[in-house]
Every structure is written in C-alpha cells, then in structure tokens.
C-alpha cells in the first residue's frame, strides 16, 4: 500500500515515466550507502537495463547517502520530502502557495547542510577544525538561506494580509461556502467538476489541486453556494511541509459546510479519514460547522460489499454513499447540503431546565423561538431552526 501511494506520488510529476518499483526491507540502514552492497549492485543492473535517470526513495535519505548513491548509480536521487517538494512547486498556483513551497524547500536544504556538516566533523574525529574551509562555506550557505527565509516570510505576511482582505470581501457575498476536503485522489476535483461543470482538471494523479479553487454555483436544488476545492491530504506528510500544506487549507475555516470526500474503495479508507479529522481539528474548525461525509467511488465496490456499504451510510444522517463518476447518490447529498445551509427549517419542541439560561438566551438572540411556556421542569419552547442552528445549539 505504501509503495502504491509512493508510485502515485511519482506519477503526479509530469514528464516522469515510472519504469520499476520495488520494496527493500531495511533492518539496519547503512550509514554511508543506505543499502547493503548486494542490493546496490542488484539495483544498479536494473538501473542500467532500464536507462533510469531518477531514483525515488520513499523514506529519509541523508545527504551523504544521497551523494554516494547518485555517484554509484549515476542517477539523480530524491527522498520522500524532496519528491513532495518537487510536486508542490510544480503545482503551486497562487502567490502564497509558491512562497510557502519556496520556504519549505529552503528549510529542507538548510537542515541538510547542517547534517552534512555534522557528518564531516565526525569524519575528522572531532579534531575541532574551527575555521576550516568546509565550515566557512557551510556557515555562509546557511546565512544566505536564513536571509532568504526572512525575505520570503515577509512577503508571505503581505500575501496573507491581502488574502484576509479578500476573505472579508467575500464574507459580504450572500452565498454560503461549501468546502471539499479529503485525501488525495479521493475524487474532490471530479466532484467539483461534476457540480460546477468546470473544465476537466481531474487527472489520475495526486495533487491535481494545490491551491483552493473557488467557484460560485447554483446547486440543482436551487441554492447558490461557493464551492471550494482544496489540496488533498497525503499520509506521513514530512513535518517540514506541514505549514505549506496548512496554508492551502485556511479556506476551510471560512466554510459554512465542510464536505469530507473519502475514497471508500481504498483499503485504508478508515485510517485516511482519521488523519483528515485530526488535521481539521488542528486547524481550529468551528465545532458548529456542519460536516458531511461522502463515501465516494461506490461504483468501484462489488455487489455485496456495495449493498452493505450503502446500508451503513444510510444509517447515518451525515453520510452519503456516492459516485462522482456515475452520479449515483448525489441527489441525497445535495439535499443534505441545502439542509445544512439552513435553507430548510424545521419546527421542533424543546425543553430547557431553569439553569440553562444561556442556551435560552442564545435561542432568543438568534430569533429562533416561536413560542415559550414555563412548566414545572423548566421552559417548554417551540423553535424553528436549521440543521446548522441545531448543531450550534448542541455545542453550547
Ligand atoms: N470509479 C470512480 N473513480 C473516481 C470517482 N471519483 C473520482 N474518481 C477517480 O479518482 C481519481 C482521482 O480523482 P480526483 O478528483 O482527481 O481526486 P482529488 O481528490 O481531487 O485528488 P487531489 O487533487 O490529488 O487531492 C481520478 O482518476 C478520478 O477519475 C468515482 O466516484 N468512481
């Protein structure tokens, strides 16, 4: 599974043809060469045979190992972080995305300088080569990177401020925002295109969307909303890339409804969903914001499994089994979006205890109360409210 994801990641880079893939168990990574000598010559043959130019290692590779393997195999080598950075910089579309990626790339380079340096020092047996040529060069490189980082950070602050202004301007738009989030390849872009009729931008590759795309659409139910597509999540995102990734997700905080798109046909769909929830919690999403879960790619499941999955989804009001490709299940989902946006209001009876004054005040403040009577147990209220109001009330 990890190998499969790594291969999809590689496919996300244009102009790259994957000619081979292999799992190498590494119990005891060699400090200088990563792999054992047998493995190295075995792979070298494969590399020569297939005229391989680039080797991707789905894990961390030290700068020294990288240099040695590149020399030995006469190829360019990227580790996981290096690959994701390449993809980010290939896809970054907005000014902010580009800046974030540049910063992540520089920080990555910086740590590699430090590591290379410590390694040199160790090699020389700790003789304290203060002022040695290596050190001076590395110190100078580090300073240059630090200065560049400060410049980028300043630019980024400016860009974020401008974006904040845009967000405020958009807040005046009377349309609610529906944000699509989810793991990479879950089908967000496919769904977005289907609902908005936008040009096809879904490709069978990861990161088809790096920066949030917003589009105003009229849903088939008649409601006007702004649909926002976001960058896909990936497993084991290297920590130095988390900030760059989060910057692309801030739009989610402004959402009125969050739609979590899942590839329900993926063997690790549950673990992926957990990751997504953790990130959303970490972003500080308002607990009152309604969330809808879409179990996408239901068309890929076979007979019995499909029926059982649909039945499970049916049991939960916030879950819909759909296919962005065939369109099945989407009507129910769109109705749920409309309802979550508060277009549909229901009248319900509520009882509040006498000491729940704060909740009662909230209901009156929001103008939701139709009628109120005092009883022995407290207040008997009749309220007319939306699903969203009810969710907010539940959080009070
Ligand atoms: N069979 C099937 N395939 C789907 C469905 N939805 C999406 N796909 C396919 O899954 C792949 C990924 O879809 P995307 O829409 O690009 O996924 P995404 O979530 O936007 O991906 P990122 O941009 O990487 O985050 C494409 O090959 C789609 O054709 C579906 O309902 N059924």
Image (cartoon, helix red, strand yellow):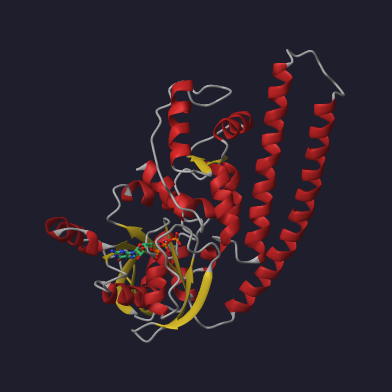
396, above or below 332, in the image: above
- Total labels drawn: 0
The quadrant of the picture occupied by the C terminus is bottom left
Tell me residue 231's x, y (percent): 50, 60
Tell me residue 71's x, y (percent): 61, 32
- Left or right: where does residue 264 sit relative to residue 391? left
Q: Residue furthest bottom?
A: 222
Q: Quadrant of ligand 1?
A: bottom left
Tell me residue 113's x, y (percent): 71, 34
Q: Residue at x 37, y 73 (%)?
A: 340
Would residue 387 be visible to someone looking at this image? yes
The answer to which quarter of the image holds residue 79 is top right
Q: Residue furthest left?
A: 304
Q: Residue furthest right?
A: 131
Q: 357 or 147: nearer the eye?
A: 147
Q: Residue at x 57, y 30 (%)?
A: 72
129, above or below 380, in the image: above
The answer to which quarter of the image holds residue 310 is bottom left
The answer to which quarter of the image holds residue 107 is top right
179, above or below 8, in the image: below
Q: 55 or 45: nearer the eye?
A: 45
Q: 72 or 292: nearer the eye?
A: 72
Q: Residue at x 45, y 63 (%)?
A: 288
Tell me residue 291's x, y (percent): 39, 63
Would residue 385 be visible to someone looking at this image? no
Q: 347 or 110: nearer the eye?
A: 110
- Left or right: where does residue 50 sit relative to residue 130? left
The quadrant of the picture occupied by the N terminus is top left
Q: Residue furthest front?
A: 49
166, above or below 26, in the image: below
């Amino acid at each position: 599974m990890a190998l499969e994801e790594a291969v999809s990641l590689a496919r996300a880079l244009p102009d790259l043809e994957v000619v081979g893939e292999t799992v190498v168990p590494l119990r005891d990574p060699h400090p200088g060469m990563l792999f054992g000598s047998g493995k190295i010559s075995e792979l070298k043959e494969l590399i020569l045979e297939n005229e391989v130019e680039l080797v991707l290692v789905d894990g961390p590779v030290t700068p020294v190992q990288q240099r040695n393997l590149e020399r030995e195999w006469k190829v360019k080598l990227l580790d996981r972080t290096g690959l994701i950075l390449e993809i980010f910089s290939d896809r970054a579309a907005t000014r902010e995305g580009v800046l974030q990626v540049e910063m992540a790339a520089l920080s990555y380079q910086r740590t590699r300088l430090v590591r290379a340096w410590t390694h040199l020092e160790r090699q020389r047996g700790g003789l304290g080569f203060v002022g040695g040529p290596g050190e001076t060069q590395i110190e100078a490189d580090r300073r240059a990177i630090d200065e560049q980082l400060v410049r980028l950070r300043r630019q980024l602050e400016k860009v974020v401020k401008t974006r904040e202004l845009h967000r405020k301007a958009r807040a005046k738009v009377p349309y609610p925002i529906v944000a699509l989030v989810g793991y990479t390849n879950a089908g967000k872009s496919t769904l977005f295109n289907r609902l908005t009729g936008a040009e096809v931008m879904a490709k069978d590759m990861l990161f088809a969307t790096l920066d949030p795309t917003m589009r105003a659409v009229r849903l088939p139910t008649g409601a006007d909303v702004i649909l926002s597509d976001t960058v896909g999540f990936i497993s084991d995102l290297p920590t130095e890339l988390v900030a760059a990734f989060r910057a692309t997700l801030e739009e989610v905080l402004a959402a009125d409804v969050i739609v979590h798109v899942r590839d329900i046909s993926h063997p690790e769909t549950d673990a992926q969903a957990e990751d997504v929830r953790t990130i959303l919690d970490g972003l500080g999403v308002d607990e009152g914001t309604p969330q809808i879960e879409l179990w996408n790619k239901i068309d890929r499941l076979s007979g019995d499994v499909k029926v059982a999955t649909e039945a499970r989804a049916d049991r939960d009001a916030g879950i819909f089994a759909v296919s962005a490709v065939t369109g099945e299940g989407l009507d129910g989902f769109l109705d749920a979006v409309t309802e979550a946006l508060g277009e549909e209001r229901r009248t319900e009876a509520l009882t509040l205890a006498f000491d729940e004054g704060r909740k009662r005040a909230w209901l009156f403040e929001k103008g939701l109360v139709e009628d109120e009577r005092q009883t022995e147990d407290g207040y008997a209220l009749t309220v007319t409210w939306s699903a969203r109001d009810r969710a907010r009330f539940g959080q009070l």
